[in-house]
């Protein structure tokens, strides 16, 4: 059985507030068809793909907020994605705002196999930004207000002939996200992001946005001997510029495919899952080299303290 997974990183250009789900899904179906024409096994869509990045606004009406969320997956509006995927025999991952039957709100990603069955779900754990209205900002980043912290940890799934994992956007900046999956022998991590270039509390970081994006994904891939597929929603959305740079990164840490635009763009790469093996067997043989007894602070403490110790 082949260990090659041909992946399409389906970067999306901006989605404005006035754009309907139907318009967005039609663009996604186009990218999916293009991926199928390149014989992709799997197409990866961004975080919160179906709408504009709504946490940039403070909203008080729950009805207005919930209009950005999906109560079911698939729904009438997203069904064409599943129908087309089944027809083409292609899998996909998709980020969306999830409203559960119990009324809980999550920033979620799903993994869908070539039979259009949902085989994996992840709910975003590292929610960036702030929980209250901060009018001094050029735009808000209210993920802490609109979403609960994900309750599923980082799972992995046997799919597409390998061990697949998912994380979402800000998770990629935290080594713990990769490591929890690395410890489950993950071979390919799929992740979508919406990353505004401007960071209101630290504008001096703005010029480094693309660099930091590459830095964390390449490090995560290499340090865990895994493929990483990072996919942006990019371009100027409601006046807010978001970075592109969607990338397919090998376990070597090298970027082997990258988007050139800030628009709808498919990046395709043939990914050999067996490339993970030499990294997992040597430099990053966890069983042989990790020292978890010495890492207790990582799980017992949240914030940094000045611990002394000379
Ligand atoms: N969507 C998301 O997680 N974006 C963040 C912005 C960080 S600044 C609040 C990111 O890490 O790219």
Image (cartoon, rainbow, N blue to C red):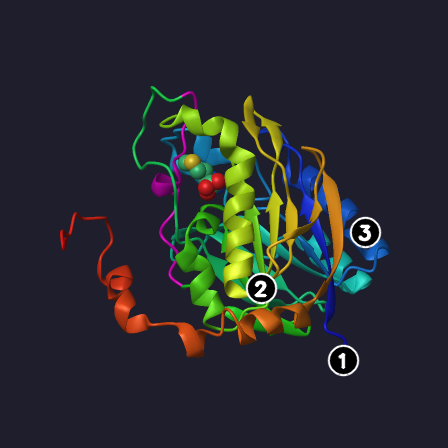
- Are the residues at dot 1 and dot 3 in contact (C-beta closer than 8 Å)? no
- Identify the disc placed on residue 226: 2
Q: Position of residue 94 (x, y in %)?
A: 60, 53
Q: Residue at x 83, y 60 (%)?
A: 39
Q: Nearer the viewer, residue 36 or 83?
A: 36
Secondary structure of the residue carrying numbered label 1 = loop
CA gap, disc 1 and disc 3:
25 Å
Asked whether residue 144 is drawn in magenta, I would say yes
- Identify the disc placed on residue 1: 1
Q: Where is residue 136, by image quadrant?
A: top left
- Identify the disc placed on residue 33: 3
In the rendered image, the vertical position of residue 288 relative to residue 109, given as above or below: below
Q: Nearer the viewer, residue 73 or 51?
A: 51
Q: Is disc 1 surrounded by few (<14), some (14 to 19) or many (20+) residues within 10 Å?
A: few
Q: Is disc 3 surrounded by few (<14), some (14 to 19) or many (20+) residues within 10 Å?
A: some
Magenta stretch, overall SS: loop
- Are the residues at dot 2 and dot 3 in contact (C-beta closer than 8 Å)? no
Asked whether residue 2 is drawn in magenta, I would say no
Q: Residue at x 78, y 59 (%)?
A: 40
Q: Is disc 2 surrounded by few (<14), some (14 to 19) or many (20+) residues within 10 Å?
A: many
Left or right relative to 146: residue 69: right
CA gap, disc 2 and disc 3:
27 Å
Mark 2 / mark 3, whichever is N-terminal: 3
Which of labels 1 and 3 is toward the front?
A: 1
């Amino acid at each position: 059985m082949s260990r090659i997974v041909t992946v399409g990183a389906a970067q999306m250009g901006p989605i404005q507030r006035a754009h309907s789900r139907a318009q967005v899904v039609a663009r996604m179906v186009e990218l999916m068809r293009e991926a199928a024409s390149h014989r992709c096994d799997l197409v990866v869509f961004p975080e919160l793909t179906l709408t504009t990045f709504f946490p940039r606004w403070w909203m008080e009406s729950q009805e207005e907020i919930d209009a950005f969320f999906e109560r079911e997956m698939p729904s009438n509006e997203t069904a064409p994605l599943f129908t087309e995927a089944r027809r083409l025999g292609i899998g996909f991952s998709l980020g969306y705002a999830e409203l559960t039957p119990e009324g809980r709100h999550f920033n979620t990603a799903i993994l869908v196999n070539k039979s259009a069955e949902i085989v994996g779900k992840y709910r975003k754990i590292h929610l960036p930004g702030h929980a209250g209205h901060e009018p001094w900002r050029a735009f808000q980043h209210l993920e802490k207000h609109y979403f609960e912290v994900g309750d599923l940890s980082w799972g992995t799934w046997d799919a597409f002939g390998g061990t697949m994992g998912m994380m979402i956007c800000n998770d990629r900046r935290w080594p713990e996200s990769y490591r929890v999956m690395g410890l489950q022998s993950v071979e390919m991590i799929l992740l979508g992001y919406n990353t505004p270039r401007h960071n209101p509390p630290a504008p001096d970081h703005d010029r480094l946005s693309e660099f930091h994006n590459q830095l964390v994904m390449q490090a995560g891939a290499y340090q865990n001997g895994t493929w990483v597929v990072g996919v942006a929603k990019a371009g100027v959305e409601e006046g807010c510029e978001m970075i592109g740079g969607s990338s397919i990164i090998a376990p070597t840490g090298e970027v082997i495919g990258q988007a050139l635009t800030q628009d709808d763009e498919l990046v395709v790469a043939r990914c050999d899952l067996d490339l993970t093996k030499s990294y997992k067997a040597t430099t990053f043989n966890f069983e042989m080299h990790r020292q978890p007894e010495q890492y207790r602070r990582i799980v017992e403490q949240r914030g940094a303290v000045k611990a002394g110790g000379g």
